[in-house]
Image (cartoon, grey):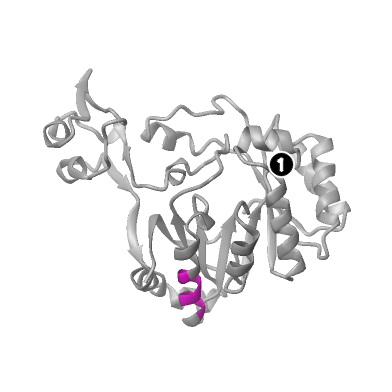
Amino acid sequence: MERGIVFAIKRGAIHDGSGIRTTVFLKGCPLNCLWCHNPEGKDPNPVLSTVRQRCIGCGACVAACLNGAVSMRDGYPETDRSRCTACGTCVAVCPTGARAILGKEYGVNELLFHIERDRVFFETSEGGVTFSGGEPLYQPDFLLSCLRACKAAGLHTALDTAGYAPKETVLQVAQYTDLFLFDLKDMDPERHRENCGVPLEPILENLRALDEAEAEVWIRIPLIPGVNCDEATIDAYIRFLSGLKRRHPVFLLPYHPVGEEKYRRLDLPYPLQGLEPPSGERVEEIRAAFSAAGFRVRVGG
């Protein structure tokens, strides 16, 4: 049976598909989007997260670290990430929960047990399970096994994806996926590669393939000021999506900096420091443009 790495299981989610859902976040992502709000999901391996506000400077983690990766500086422990193996020894001795390992190995049946706990909420709200990340397609074999198990258990399945994977994988996964939450991050190929780290065309090709296969797809567009909120880009979105067989609903996701604290916890610089969310007026203009083109459009998840 396949095993995979999960960094979070969110119960009671209401923005990851229809109804009340349990969202499973899988580790690893081939993209490197500047505005990523789950940086802990990029690395396919477990990572150490530290919350300085909870630290009391006791030094227990320094003494416990087997690799000499933790040392005190100005009364607080600092971690040399090049020496840290995310073994969890420091986490075990921390008295305040200031340190945590994000990423745990699960088997399919073990994960299904956690998901099944919320079946009553799924049934009363027409909800189900959503696989997110990271990029869930980064662990294709584990994801496929999980989807098969969920469908066999009679659960509604959704996949939150950026669509960057071999087309064969996407279509295979589609056989067990009731809903795709497809993140379409930009329409300019050069800018997409620069800001997201991967080419755009395979993503568009996979979206076309899902459309041809008559998969249920919700298009989710992050609105990033200075990147993809200009009129030319919005027009490009509308032209491309209008060319598909179906008018898939569009969800506009205005940029927000809530992920900034996560970067601090991973000792990473925040790439968009100081960037302001798009104005309400601009978001409404974009919503109106999609609506005028015949799309059902919603602002927010």
* SS at badge 1: loop
Indicate the position of residue 80 as horizontal and vertical percent values.
28, 28
Q: Residue at x 69, y 50 (%)?
A: 202
118 sits to left or right of 69: right
Q: Residue at x 78, y 48 (%)?
A: 287
Q: From which residue to which does the magenta span run? A: 145-151
Which image quarter: residue 169? bottom right
Indicate the position of residue 158 as horizontal and vertical percent values.
57, 66
For label 1, count other residues whose C-alpha is less than 10 Å away and answer few (under 14), some (14-19) or many (20+). Answer: many
- Give 251 or 142, whichever is nearer the viewer: 142
Indicate the position of residue 210 as horizontal and vertical percent values.
71, 64
Query: Looking at the figure, which quarter contains the C terminus?
Result: bottom right
Q: Is residue 75 magenta?
A: no
Residue, far top:
74
Count the marks. 1
Residue 215 shows in the view: yes
